[in-house]
Image: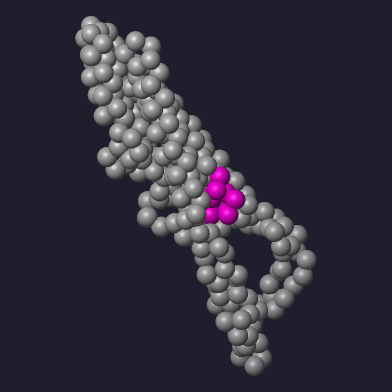
Amino acid sequence: MLDANMEIDNLRQRLRFKNLDETVINSICNNAAVEINLASTDLLANAMEDAVRAGQDKKAIKFINELKVTQSGHHFSIGTDSGMHDFSEPPFPMLPKLLKNAKTAKDGSQYKVIPIREKGSKMSSGRTAVTTEAALKNINEARHIAKEARDARKEAGASNNLTPDSLKGMSTFAALQAINEARKAFPTMSQKSTEPVIAYRTASSKQDASSKWVQPGTQKNMTNELHSINSRLQSSLDTAIENTIRNYEARY
């Protein structure tokens, strides 16, 4: 990724070769920095939204809750708190849990009658939808807060003829996403299903827990999705920086 601040410094030097007044140069560079900041913050927000949607498609709630913008120098990318990209879940033997508080049969075995609900329960999709909505809401709030901070710096920079750090707004956005406790406070406790019961089956301690009542595993590897999102992000950020610098230089 291009270093926006370095590109603005280079723009400043080229403008000096055109014998422009230093006050004018400061104003040009200030405006260019703010414009880059505006475009970059929106691109980061868009990338975060893409990542949230990708998590929604795979019902990867943990992935959505861990999403954040990471910064290393002038480089930005979408990642997770844990650094994990694969949130797949292995098959889960449910029999021990199902037999909790079970009844005792005459032969001493434990059993419990289990209601079987229609496949495609709305519980999981409902939790995913709530998590997604909360994440997108907080991204929009981060956009708003970053914009307010950016506008304040723009006004201060204009009055002092100082060029702001073009990355500051992006850093603000990254910090907001990294410590977004409101999004991560989404309750993940079990919800009572309202899906209709279609059958009743008996879970028994005589059954093989490795083959009976085993919840299938799920594939939630987000590696490819994140790679694609970050590749588009870097390309878009570089284009935004290049176009802004080129446009301001062409005006003078």
Residue at x 56% of width, y 58% of height: 190
Compared with 75, 154 (above or below) is above
Name the residue nearer the viewer: 50 or 172.
Answer: 50
Image vertical order of residue 194 relative to residue 91, above or below? above
**Magenta stretch in the rendered image:** 53-61
Give how far across and how far down residue 39 sits, in percent. 43, 27
* Residue 200 place in picture, x, y as percent: 74, 72
Using the image as rendered, state which of residue 97 and residue 11 is in the foreground. 11
The magenta stretch spans residue 148:
no
Which image quarter: residue 209?
bottom right
Q: Who's the residue at 74% across and 62% down the image? A: 118
Q: How is the image coloured?
A: one colour
Question: Image check: 208 left or right of 227?
Answer: right
Q: Nearer the viewer, residue 202 or 138?
A: 138
Question: As drawn, which residue projects farthest toward the front?
Answer: 17
Could you say which quadrant of the image residue 101 lies in? bottom right
Vertical arrangement, residue 134 with respect to residue 120, above or below: above
The residue depicted at 68 percent of the width and 58 percent of the height is 121
Q: Quadrant of the C terminus?
A: top left
Work out which quarter of the rendered image holds the N terminus and state it. top left
Vertical comparison of 66 with 24: above or below: below
Q: Judge from the rendering whether residue 8 lies leftward or rightward of residue 137; answer left or right.
A: left
Residue 239 picture location, percent across and down: 43, 31
Main SS class of the magenta portion in the image: helix
The one nearer the camera, 86 or 140, is 86
Look at the image and tell me whether residue 210 can be seen: yes
